[in-house]
Amino acid sequence: ISMEKGQIQIKNRPYDLKDLYLDVHQESTAPTTLRLSANGKVRFRGDRVYFSLFGSVSHNHGGEGSTYVDIDLETGKVTINWIPWPESMPVKGGDFETRLKIKGELQNPMSVNGKIITESLHFLLRRPDQNKELSLPDMTIDFRSSIERRKIDISSLQVITPDVPISL
């Protein structure tokens, strides 16, 4: 399956895909594995952001009828306001890029490991007794996590700024 300059709109969703290039083909050495390659632009809240996706989807992985994914996903610069932030930490501005590796069986916890790189991040920390405005020109967040249903378990988190690295 191939698509060039495609467009996908999903009914009742606030986003769509434009300028979509998609290539899906069966791997010759593993007939139950599909190789995926895609790139294009996601439109959300009036902005368009470039993305690329490469990887594979295998059915009957391990002979148990399960579906296994192994996908690399990258985005171009995204405005930080695409993410809903808690009232205690309103974000005023900034951009980020992502590089994610998504792996695992769809029926089990999936590992999501990656990097989030921010630029010109401006936010406010609110406490009952004070507010503090913060600006970070650059920050990189490296993480390892697993996702199961609506639960995200972060096993490793490293925040790197020009001045102070933080590991959790």
Image (cartoon, rainbow, N blue to C red):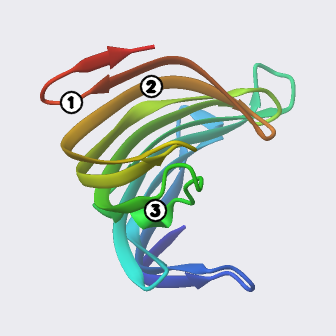
For marks 1 and 2, the one nearer the N-term is 2
Determine whether the residue tagged by mark 3 lies in a helix, strand or loop: strand
Q: Position of residue 23 (x, y in %)?
A: 46, 62
For the residue pair 98 and 62, the one nearer the viewer reads as 98
The residue wearing badge 2 is: 143
The residue wearing badge 3 is: 23
Amino acid residing under circle 1: Thr
Picture residue at 48% right of the left edge, 66% below the top:
82
For the residue pair 19 and 13, the one nearer the viewer reads as 13
Q: Callout 1: few (<14), some (14-19), or many (20+) C-alpha neighbours within 10 Å?
A: some
Query: From the viewer's perspective, is the residue at label 3 or at label 2 nearer?
Result: 2
| Residue 43 in sight from this viewpoint | yes
Q: Callout 3: few (<14), some (14-19), or many (20+) C-alpha neighbours within 10 Å?
A: some
| Image quadrant in which the N terminus is located | bottom right
Determine which of the numbered discs, if any, sits on residue 55 in the image: none
Rendering quarter of residue 61: top right
Amino acid residing under circle 2: Phe
For marks 3 and 2, the one nearer the N-term is 3
